[in-house]
Image (spheres, helix red, strand yellow):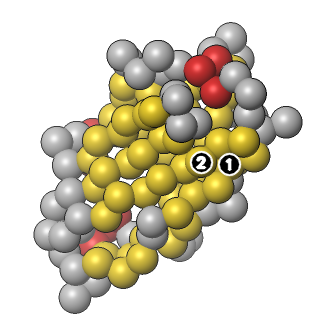
Amino acid sequence: QVQLVESGGGLEQPGGSLRLSCAASVRSFGSYHMGWFRQAPGKERELVVEINWSGDTTYYTNSVKGRFTISRDNAKNTVYLQMNSLKPEDTAVYYCAARLSVRPEYEYWGQGTQVTVSS
């Protein structure tokens, strides 16, 4: 079983920055691909970014390219999401998720952290 705990959300002004963290309680963190999803009110949950088990392959949805950066520290069982140049449309609940590298679907989810971008 994998437990994921997100932190770092909050209220930020447009153009500002936030850093989300996701701490995983699992023995073999390095075996998992990690992703950040978000869900805005009235919208479906979407994959924002993901990183493979070793950290050398990443994916970014077009709307966050050049603004968001995902990274991981396998020694600390933690994945990070650095969000810069925030926009009001980034407002959502952000979820951390994990899947084994051999699995096609994300299996484990955090409780979510609210990110609100507003002046």
Is the Cβ of the residue at disc 2 closer than 8 Å to that at disc 1? yes
**Residue bearing the label numbered 2:** 23
**The C terminus, quarter of image:** bottom left
Question: Which disc, if any, is residue 4?
Answer: 1
Q: Where is residue 45 in the image (x, y as percent from the top left)?
A: 57, 53
Judge whether residue 76 can be spotted in this image: yes
Q: What residue type is labelled 2?
A: Ala
C-alpha gap between disc 2 and disc 1:
6 Å
Instruction: Identify the residue at image location x=20%, y=49%.
Output: 67
Q: Which amino acid does label 1 sit on?
A: Leu
**Image position of 69 with respect to 111: above or below:** above
**Image position of 94 with respect to 72: above or below:** below
Res 24 quadrant in image: top right
In the image, is 53 to the left or to the right of 104?
left
Instruction: Identify the residue at image location x=44%, y=34%.
Output: 72
Looking at the rendered structure, the secondary structure element under dot 1 is strand
